Amino acid sequence: MKPSFVEVEGLRLAYRRCGDGEPLVLLHGGFSDGREMRNQLEGLSDSYDVVAWDCLGSGESSDPPAGFGLRDYATVLAGGIAELGLERPHVLGLSFGSMYALVLYRYFAQLPRTLILASAYAGWGGSLPPGEVQARVDSVVAALEVPPAEWGRDFLSTVYSAEVSDSVVDEAMGIMAGVRASGTREQLRAFAFCDLRDVLPLIEVPTLLLYGELDQRSPLAVAEDLHVAITGSRLVVLPGVGHGANMEAPDAFNDAVRRFLADH
């Protein structure tokens, strides 16, 4: 599906939209763009108005200006949601997108109807030891110096379980081929060290925490921390699945999302 575009704060935001019903906003993971959510666009659009955004710096959206901060990212996303007339959407964020969803909630708590935080962190700084955060930052910085073809498959071995199909890895590699170093560096500068634990006890909307049992990047100990901190949250663990559960096990992922949304 080819993207459409809106302009917010002088920046171009790309999105893919499909379906009818209550609005469901999808926020993709790192080294990726809205194409990563293809299975959710296709699988949930029978019941929902599904919109998958390309984050600024990714896909066909503009690069964020130098010095763009977390509030700026939240403001642009909220503006894009308003431009499309998405009234109180359900907001699903995956991995990096989960951080973005929490940042949106920090500054626009009245906007989301529900939150679905998949393979989530309370920011790297809020969920991982400082040494691990720095190691990840160093790894991203080094990766951006060479084409994704040289490091992508090694990276994806930490994203999916050992049983993932070749077709999923090939699709992910195709998406990663479009990674822009300039945009990713700005995303990294804004988000890499953020600690969003202060947001968690403030969440007052129904929240689903959706994780893969075999997630190496955001392990179940992180899931449990978020579950304890977000009052009334629901934790669902998909067996035999890694960090990129939305692509590795799309049917199980979509079923969990659909069951949660049916209750809210």
Image: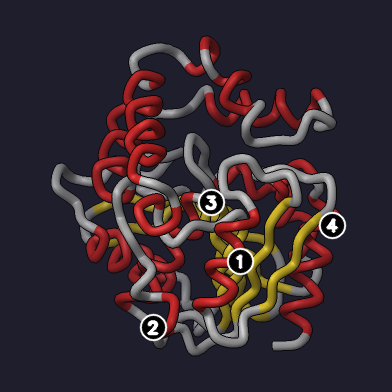
Q: Is residue 203 visible?
A: yes
Amino acid, disc 2: Ala
Q: Give the labeled residue for mark 1.
A: 224
Q: Give the labeled residue for mark 4.
A: 252
Badge 3 or badge 2: first in the primary sequence:
3
Could you tell whether 44 is left or right of 190 in the image? right
Q: Give the labeled residue for mark 3.
A: 95
Describe the element under mark 1 as helix, strand or loop. helix
Q: In which quarter of the image is the C terminus?
A: bottom right
Q: In which quarter of the image is residue 253?
A: bottom right
Q: Which residue is drawn at 52% across and 22% down?
A: 177
- Front residue (pair 183, 18): 183
Badge 2 or badge 1: first in the primary sequence:
2
Describe the element under mark 2 as helix, strand or loop. loop
Q: Which residue is drawn at 56% across and 76% down?
A: 228
Q: Are marks 2 and 1 in contact (CB under 8 Å)?
A: no
Q: How far apart are marks 3 and 2 (CA)?
A: 20 Å
Describe the element under mark 4 as helix, strand or loop. helix
Vertical side of 234 occupied by 101: above or below: above
